Each structure stands twice: as structure tokens, then as C-alpha cells.
Image (tube, helix red, strand yellow):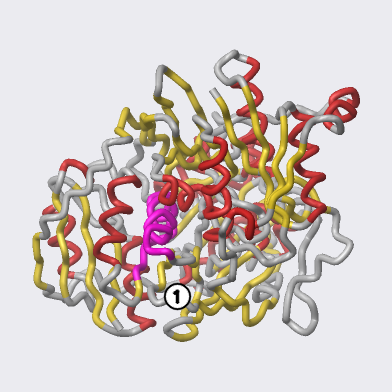
Amino acid sequence: MSILVIAEHDNASLKAATLNTLAAAKAIGGDVHVLVAGSGCGAAAEAAAQADGVAKVLVADNAAYEYQLAENVAALVADLGKDYTHVLASATSNGKNIMPRAAALLDVQAISDIISVESSDTFKRPIYAGNVIATVQSSDAIKVITVRGTAFDAVAAEGGSAAVESIDNAQDAGVSSFVGEELAKSDRPELTAAKIVISGGRGMQNGENFEMLYKVADKLGAAVGASRAAVDAGFVPNDMQVGQTGKIVAPELYIAVGISGAIQHLAGMKDSKVIVAINKDEEAPIFSVADYGLVADLFEAVPELESSI
Amino acid sequence: MKILVAVKRVVDYNVKVRPKSDGTDVDIANAKMSINPFCEIAVEEAVRLKEKGVATEVVAVSLGTKQSQEQIRTAMALGADRGILVETDAELQPLAVAKCLNAIIAKESPDLVIMGKQSIDGDNNQTGQMLGALSNMPQGTFASEVAVEDGTVNVTREIDGGLQTVKLNLPAIVTTDLRLNEPRYASLPNIMKAKKKPLDTTTPDELGVDVAPRVQTLKVEPPAERSAGIKVADVAELVEKLKNEAKVI
């Protein structure tokens, strides 16, 4: 078996999600190569070479790949992928954008968002918003897969010493271009990579009150998330949403503040190791999944929490 | 400009789906069926483009059993001009759907294809991207804003770190995210009018597409249940438990 893992990176650094995807590759077993497609992405490639279990890093350094445009990167992934039995990427917005396109170019039915490897052709994945887990078997010669990072413990970021090989393969479809981006600027960790996440819901009442959560987060080194209700009410931006249609998180500690616990939200956080719920409504469904529930007014409990940690 | 919109018939989002006790499939017999929410957003976006004078015709396509006609009628009640049903009782996987849609594109030559980013049953999030590959069109996935200009479309995409805007040459594929728009409710007169709009039927065979599944579902099961823990009396006890029992802070 030979596995190509598509690195998640921003040219300057390798994203942590890649290490979880490498863990899924390890579970399948075989020679693992990593593709770093980007522009000026040497540092990301060096980081990939250090990761545990990587035999070789392929670097496609070309302006066509700078912004991960799907038309170009998928063409590259499909071209390289035909020499592998498995092609894996993280189920991030980038992986979800590129991999199905690459799969269709290879005439393969992709498998999205796997949460376990049962064998080299059989995998588990959630369907119906996580209410059902399906075990699926692929009959395609090449398996094109996206991996839910929270379901696989990351491989070590260091200790490896893979060879780094430049490849000259510029796929520029010329039909799309990058216009701009607005990325949330934050010194806090990324939601999907954070060890601790504290999220606010409708009970926060407004965006200003999230300041209380930011203070706790900064003391704990945590990321701050939100429920769909809080996002739809305009308290905080979209990219903070945790849930079925937002980000899937599974930190060591998840603190849900003023969140009732709609199925939609639970689908995004119920695999967290320890869940704390703070809510004044003791009947709130969030308490049915919480390890530690505190029935209290969040406007008293959160500041007290901040001062006692 | 002609817009093609794909719509899927799925179990209504309010229904909590469970596996059958023998684990062979999900239990959805007699469940309420609806248009997939992301597809509804796609229809709304296409209709708004028509209302703005950007588009001249909106064609709604669905694939599946005869009953999928209902979802095409829903799309027409929201403003689509006509419908096409690719009728089959076979299980359809995203690659097969993309191949059928690609065959429809070859006949219809739309300038823009708008579809949901994923359906809430299979949660695959693949068909739009696959259609992009097969039709050789660029793709703007997870769209929160769509702006058609002269021969191009600017798509603002919801990505993990925020928003990204790409410019795509037309014809192009757009897949919708949750916040692209808020779909309207179909009015009764429009529901009545939709019944008279043209709806053509074809089949995967007629389109020359082999829809045989490539992935087999061996088993379905409920997710691991999480049991409720304990209630703590106050913040001090919570902090104590987190430090000494759970050891997470």
C-alpha cells in the first residue's frame, strides 16, 4: 500500500490537522508520502518531513498553488494520485474543496470525513448529522478520503527525517483566481486544534458579553466558539460556529456557556473528552452530555470562574 | 443567462434519523421528506439572480425516484421556470449524480450551476466539486456571497479561518453555504402556478451514465452514547473537579 497525504498548510507552516490525517494514514499502513502544494512553501515542507511516519515529502512549489485554488490543486492531486492506493486529506474547508474534485478526475467515489479505519478499504463515517455511523467499503482501485481530525490522535510533529523532493508539475487551469480573504485575526489557538474550547450560546445575550469568555480563554489558552443561535443572532462571526454546519471540535475540555444543547450543536462537540455546561436552565439538553454541569447564572459564574483559575 | 439548480429529496431536517435494529440501513420509512435545506438556498439564489435581471431562466434538476418531482415542484413554486427529473430507483452516490448532472449540462449549456454544498442525509459534500471536475468548470464552494459580473462570478466562500473570495470564469459551479440567503416561503398562487410549469423526465440510461455504486454500506449503527455526569454545586467545586479529577486545567 502507498498513501499520499495532502498537507494542510499556509505555505509558512504546516497545520496541525495534517498530523491527524497522518495518523489515519498510519492506521491504513504502508508507505506514506506527503504532498505540499503551495507557493514559497519550503518551510511547510520541512515541517512535514519532521512528522512521524513520513517516508517522503513531495513539494510542488508554484504560483498556481499559492491560494489552494481547487481547479489547480485537484488536477495536481489527481495526476500524482494515480500512483497511490490511497489519497488522504484533512476534512477541513480546503480538503473538502479539493478532494472530491480530484476523485472525480480519477473516476473514484470519494469517502468523506472518516472517523475510523477498519481495514485498507473499509471505514466508518458519520451520516445524518452524526446521528448514524455508517461502515462503508470502497471498491475503487484508489481510495480518495477526507479525515475528521478530531477522530485520530495526531502523530508526533518531530522525530522524522523524510527526504524532501521537488516536483515540477504546474497545473494552472486558468479559469479561477484569488481575489482576497478576510481571516479572523486572533492570538488564541484555532478552534479545531485547541486543547480547551469555551463556547457561548444565545444565553450570552449579545456580542459584548463574549468578552467574559475571551478573558477565561486567555487564562486557559483556550479557543472561543459559539452555537449557531449565537452566530445567527449576530453576536459573533460565522467562523466561530461549532456544530453540524460549523466546525467539529473534540478538545480535552469543552466549556459550554449559555448553550441549550441543540442536536445541531452536540454534533459538533460531543466527542470532547470532558464537557462542562454552565446554564441556568437545569432542564437544558446540554446537561445530558456534560461531565460537569453547573446550574447557575452565567453572568455570575463566568467571572467567578475567571478569577478562580 | 441560464442557471441550472440541482435539488435533492431528503428526510426533513426535523426528523431524528435512527438505524434499523438489524443495522442494515436507516429507518426512514414514512419519514417526512423535504427539499434539502442547502438546495433550497441554491434555488433562492438563482431566483434572486433572475429577479435582478442577471439570469433569464432557472432550470431545476433532481435525481431519484418519481417522488422527487415534489421537490422540483417546490423549486418551481419558489421561482424556477421548469424542471428535469432524472428518474431512477437505484441508490445514487455523488459521483453518479455528478455524471448525470454533467450529461444534463451538455444538453442545457447553463452559464451557472448552483447547488447545495451537501445534503443532510449522506453529508458527503462532494457532488458540486465532482461536477466541476467532470464539466471542466471552476468551482466556488461554500458560498456566502455570489456576484455575477461580465463573464465571471465572484464567490465569497466560508473557509475555516474566515472568508475567501475567488473570481471564476463562467460557466461555473457554485455550492451554497448556510448564510448565502434566507429562502422565501412559496405563496399559494405560486404553488398552484408551479403545477403547470413544464417538467421533463429522463433516466440515467438515456443520459448514458452508469450509476452503479462504488461504495457499499456494510453496516449502520447509532453513535456511542455519552452519559450525563454530575452536577456541581458551585464554581469552586467545578474548578476543583477540573483540576484534580479530570486534570484538564
Residue at the extreme top: B53
Secondary structure of residue under mark 1? loop
In the foreground, B33 or A248: B33
Asked if the magenta segment contains residue A218, the reply would be no
Taken as a whole, is the magenta stretch helix, strand or loop? Answer: helix
Residue at (45% x, 42% y) in the render: A215
Up the image or down, A252 lies above or below A73; here it is below
Asked if the magenta segment contains residue A103, the reply would be yes
Q: Which range is magenta? A: A87-107
Q: Is residue A2 left or right of residue B136?
A: left
Residue B151 on image: x %, y %: 40, 22
Up the image or down, A84 lies above or below A60; here it is below
Task: Examine the rendering and report whether any part of residue A297 can be seen.
Answer: no
Q: Quadrant of residue B150?
A: top left
Q: Is residue A180 left or right of residue A254?
A: left
Q: Is residue B237 left or right of residue B25?
A: left
Of the residues shown, which amino acid type is indicated by label 1?
Asp
Q: Residues within 10 Å of mark 1 (few under 14, many from 20)?
A: some
In the foreground, A75 or A301: A75
Residue A118 on image: x %, y %: 49, 84
Q: Chain of mark 1?
A: A
Q: Which residue is mark 1?
A: A140
Up the image or down, A237 lies above or below A287; here it is above
Quadrant in which the N terminus of chain A is drawn: bottom left
Residue A22 on image: x %, y %: 32, 72
